[in-house]
């Protein structure tokens, strides 16, 4: 399927999703409390079968869902996306027991998932994670004289395995800026199992929220969806909680982000389209200077520029998602480009829309006031715009070197 076109049934499905979001999901969203998980909304997404599609659809379908829901109800879009982000590592890398326990509950909306990667000192630099997964030894830690001196390269001893049980660790440290925290039912947590190994020493764990030593604090953020910090005080985990392989958790994180980054762009495109449509309606009927706003060339040109940028971003999002689904080369670069262009475009479009609406757009409860708060965060989470540019440049130089090496 060409990346620049959709099949008629896909277009019809997007229309149905917009209607569902406006008629059934938005009323539930309006009853929710900002900064908290809206479990009624999550349950309705499950009842409608949308959460289940997270595990059966490709990247393009995920983009279509996120764009369509975002157009009419950003809260529903975010609730769906966070379920997918938190549970995708379980779907892709979990054991049969892990998948059987959690994925049906995520799909029906009775369990809330979260993706716990960022830390106070490791946001954009995900390889700098400091949350420790220390081997759990009944006999205690090694004597201080046997420990490696400060600043030296060290390799963690392998986790201790009981004769009749799995390897065990204790998680100690913090996570921050975690969506759905501290109200999620389980977390995909990335912790350092091998000190000094950078990205190669990180392991992904599935950590239920009721584990002893795990506590959380909500954070009061500009975005209306729940975000919090997590504190790990020697939280016990075992090999049964590992997602994928020990010391290979960075691959789990990057694989998840490569799939979801284009759909972050789709979320942004949905918001931008809503802002453009509101602007078209407003400038068409707003009287000014002996005519309507649309009659002013400066206004008409701004509207045209908004539409141009949205369409370019949409096409890049669809292309990146299609490349992911088809296993095409260059997915990290395409995903980074899609997220970067779409989120920066949405910021521009919503800001222009506010300017053309004037003071009314800043009033609490106005669509654009809501979008103005929502649109800022996607330029930061799942890799800030600067990180996306770094990924793009890295992939470009790697491609150039590969070509030169083949000559």
Image (cartoon, rainbow, N blue to C red):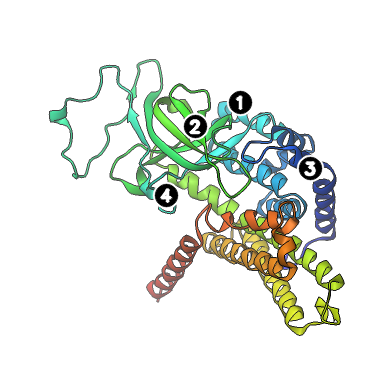
Query: Which residue is under mark 1?
Result: 101
Mark toward the viewer: 3 or 4? 3
Q: Residues within 10 Å of mark 3 (few under 14, many from 20)?
A: many
Task: Note whether 179 is above or below 18 in the view shown.
Answer: above
- Counting from the top left corner in percent of width and height, residue 159 is at 33, 28
Mark 1 or mark 4: whose residue is earlier in sequence: 1
Side of 92 relative to 43 (left or right): left
Q: Residues within 10 Å of mark 2 (few under 14, many from 20)?
A: some
- Residue at image coords 64%, 53%: 374
Query: Which residue is under mark 3?
Result: 25
What separation in Å lies between label 3 and label 4 (alpha carbons)? Answer: 34 Å
Task: Note whether 296 is above or below 210 in the view shown.
Answer: below
Tally of marks = 4
Name the secondary structure under disc 1.
helix
What separation in Å lies between label 4 and label 2 (alpha carbons)? Answer: 21 Å
Name the secondary structure under disc 2.
strand
- The answer, for residue 263, to whether it is visible in the render is no
Name the secondary structure under disc 4.
helix
Mark 3 or mark 4: whose residue is earlier in sequence: 3
Mark 4 or mark 2: whose residue is earlier in sequence: 4
- Counting from the top left corner in percent of width and height, residue 45 is at 75, 38
Query: Which residue is under mark 4?
Result: 126
Any mark on residue 216, and which?
2
Mark 1 or mark 2: whose residue is earlier in sequence: 1
């Amino acid at each position: 399927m060409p990346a620049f076109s959709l099949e008629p049934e896909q277009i019809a499905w997007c229309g149905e999703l917009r209607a569902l979001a406006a008629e059934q999901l938005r009323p539930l969203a309006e009853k929710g409390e900002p900064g908290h998980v809206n479990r009624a909304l999550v349950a309705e997404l499950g009842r409608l079968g949308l959460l289940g599609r997270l595990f059966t659809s490709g990247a393009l379908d995920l983009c279509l869902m996120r764009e369509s829901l975002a157009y009419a109800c950003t809260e529903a879009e975010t609730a769906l996306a966070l379920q997918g982000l938190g549970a995708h590592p379980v779907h892709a890398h979990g054991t049969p027991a892990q998948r059987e326990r959690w994925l049906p509950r995520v799909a029906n909306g009775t369990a809330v998932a979260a993706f716990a990667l960022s830390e106070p000192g490791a946001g954009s630099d995900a390889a700098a994670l400091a949350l420790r997964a220390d081997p759990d030894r009944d006999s205690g830690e090694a004597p201080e004289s046997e420990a490696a001196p400060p600043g030296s390269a060290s390799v963690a001893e392998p986790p201790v395995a009981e004769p009749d049980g799995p390897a065990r660790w204790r998680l100690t440290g913090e996570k921050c800026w975690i969506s759905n925290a501290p109200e999620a039912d389980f977390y995909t947590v990335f912790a350092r199992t091998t000190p000094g190994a950078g990205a190669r020493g990180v392991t992904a764990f599935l950590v239920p929220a009721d584990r002893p030593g795990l506590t959380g604090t909500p954070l009061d953020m500009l975005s209306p969806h729940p975000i919090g910090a997590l504190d790990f005080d020697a939280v016990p985990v075992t090999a049964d909680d590992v997602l994928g392989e020990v010391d290979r958790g960075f691959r789990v994180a990057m694989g998840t982000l490569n799939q979801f980054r284009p759909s972050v762009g789709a979320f942004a495109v949905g918001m931008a389209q809503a802002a453009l449509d509101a602007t078209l309606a407003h400038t068409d009927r707003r009287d000014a200077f002996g005519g309507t706003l649309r009659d002013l060339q400066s206004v008409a040109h701004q509207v045209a520029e908004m539409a141009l940028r949205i369409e370019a971003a949409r096409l890049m999002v669809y292309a990146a998602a299609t490349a992911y689904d088809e296993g095409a080369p260059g997915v990290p670069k395409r995903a980074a480009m899609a997220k970067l262009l779409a989120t920066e475009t949405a910021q521009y479009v919503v800001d222009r829309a506010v300017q053309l609406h004037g003071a009314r757009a800043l009033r609490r409860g106005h669509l654009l006031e809501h979008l103005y708060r929502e649109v800022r965060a996607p330029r930061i989470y799942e890799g800030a715009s600067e990180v996306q540019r770094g990924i793009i440049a890295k992939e470009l130089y790697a491609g150039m070197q590969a070509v030169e090496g083949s000559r």
